[in-house]
Amino acid sequence: MDGQKITISNGKLNVPDFPIIPFIEGDGIGPDIMRASLKVWDASVEKAYGGKRKIVWKEIFAGKKAFERIGNYLPDETVETIKDYIVAIKGPLTTPVGGGFRSLNVTMRKVLELYACVRPVKYYKGSPSPVKNPEKLDVVIFRENTEDVYAGIEWKMGSDEAKRLIKILDEQFGVKIRKDSGIGIKPISEFGTKRLVRKAIRYAIDNNRKSVTLVHKGNIMKYTEGAFKEWGYEVALDEFRDYIITESELWDQVIGDDGVTPTTKPGAFAELRGGKEAGDPGDRIVVKDRIADQMFQQILTRTDEYDILAMPNLNGDYMSDACAAQVGGLGIAAGSNIGDYIGLFEPTHGTAPKYRGLDKVNPSSLILSGVMMLRYLGWNEPADIIETALEKTIMDKKVTYDFARHFGIKPIKTSEFAEEIIKRM
Ligand code: NAP
């Protein structure tokens, strides 16, 4: 079938009824979960639109499959195609630890300027969970995707570059570093932070969410993570003043006479709250911040006080998996990498190589990444159909090994799970 390209007009995606969407199968468990997911996505679109709309899939190559066919793990053509078609979806790709080539995922995020890694984490009824009230978790993580120690600026112990840097730091800055050190650099910029936080706040406004929390380790890393927090508040106040209230304003806190200590001045910001009591934001989005280590306990102990989370790259990586664990694990963890317009959707997990080709793992992670993609296209009907059917399937205990082992029941295969979802649409 002939499809058309998605285009951009007036700052918005223009989605034809038969959009061409490139997909990368992925390594390891990628082919198993992609095969299952494609069936589910197609069935939901057919169910919703009865043939009036349909995705025209276009396979593109990265990872092992690209290397075998083209001799390159990430062909330029793949990157160019994603740029050209604007919306794409991918399975996980292998990254060797401690050597080999640089992460293909990190490279794609950087080259395509996909600066926001957006990962919603919420509970689907019936999923196994290690916590008592998993339904309390409903967050969307906005993880910065191009900076931080993740930018991959690092040199091996003993390399010429590492030796030179150690020498410069010693001679020019008086900083002593052990000679047998590898060196990594952690850049966090005002530009990178502001565009990420801007996207998170915009999302909170568009989706009627309650708060945006800036998660950082600024008490220790003042000029990177601490600056992330400061710049985050700046965007909130400079660009979204009519929509937000900061946590200190919420509680009528002003800086005291010493210029540092917050003190309470009742009613100081009552106007921002629409006359409501201190602690009640009215219809405003609360912008707050938390130190990362304490955030890991807060998300367990005061789960429903958090909503949209914006954070630097490394914290965001940890937080996504930790949140996923509360609602059923990586098998159900969806994600996306979003730039100004381009959206590349992918599960949070990796290639789980030990399960490769066994038709065994949970495809929900990729299926739900597709749900995010459908919503990105503005196709909410098939997205709703999938979410409802997937929840029914889990509640009927038709589940893959990861959920089945918690219930002590016999698992079904990846492909069978997809069929069960389709049956329930
Ligand atoms: P992983 O592939 O995410 O797998 C870790 C564990 O998570 C699995 O052993 C399995 O747990 C569980 N899991 C992952 N996917 C699942 C699914 N669909 N259904 C059910 N359970 C699932 O992490 P890894 O083994 O550390 O990484 C493997 C490779 O993937 C590495 O090369 C890494 O760099 C790469 N990676 C790629 C991406 C990406 O493409 N965006 C992201 C992360 C990692 P059990 O063992 O308990 O069953």
Image (spheres, rainbow, N blue to C red):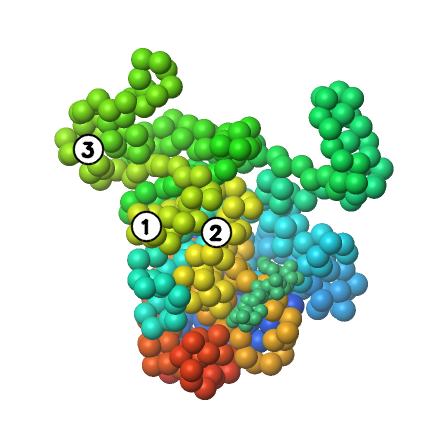
Figure quarter occupied by ligand 1: bottom right
Q: Tell me the quadrant of the picture where the C terminus can be found.
A: bottom left
- Where in the figure is residue 353, as x and y percent of width and height? 64, 71
Helix, strand or loop under label 1 = loop
Rate crowding at label 1 as few (under 14), some (14 to 19) or many (20 or more) other CA atoms within 10 Å.
few
- Asked whether the viewer can see residue 54, the reply is no
Q: Residue at x 37, y 76 (%)?
A: 394
Q: Residue at x 73, y 28 (%)?
A: 176
Q: Which mark is residue 146?
A: none
- Where in the figure is residue 28, as x and y percent of width and height? 64, 70
Q: Earlier in the sequence, mark 1 or mark 2?
A: 1
Q: Nearer the viewer, mark 3 or mark 1?
A: 1
- Where in the figure is residue 352, as x and y percent of width and height? 60, 69
Q: Foreground residue, 344 or 399?
A: 399
Q: Which mark is residue 302?
A: 1
Residue 424 found in image quarter: bottom left
Q: Nearer the viewer, mark 1 or mark 2?
A: 1
Label 1 near label 3: C-beta < 8 Å? Answer: no
Pointer 3: what residue? 278
Horizontal side of 329 relative to 254 (left or right) equals right
- The CA distance from mark 1 to mark 2 is 15 Å
Q: Is residue 337 above or below residue 227?
A: below
Q: Earlier in the sequence, mark 3 or mark 2?
A: 3
Q: Residue furthest top?
A: 257
Q: Amino acid at mark 3?
A: Ala
Pointer 2: what residue? 319
Q: Residue at x 55, y 28 (%)?
A: 223
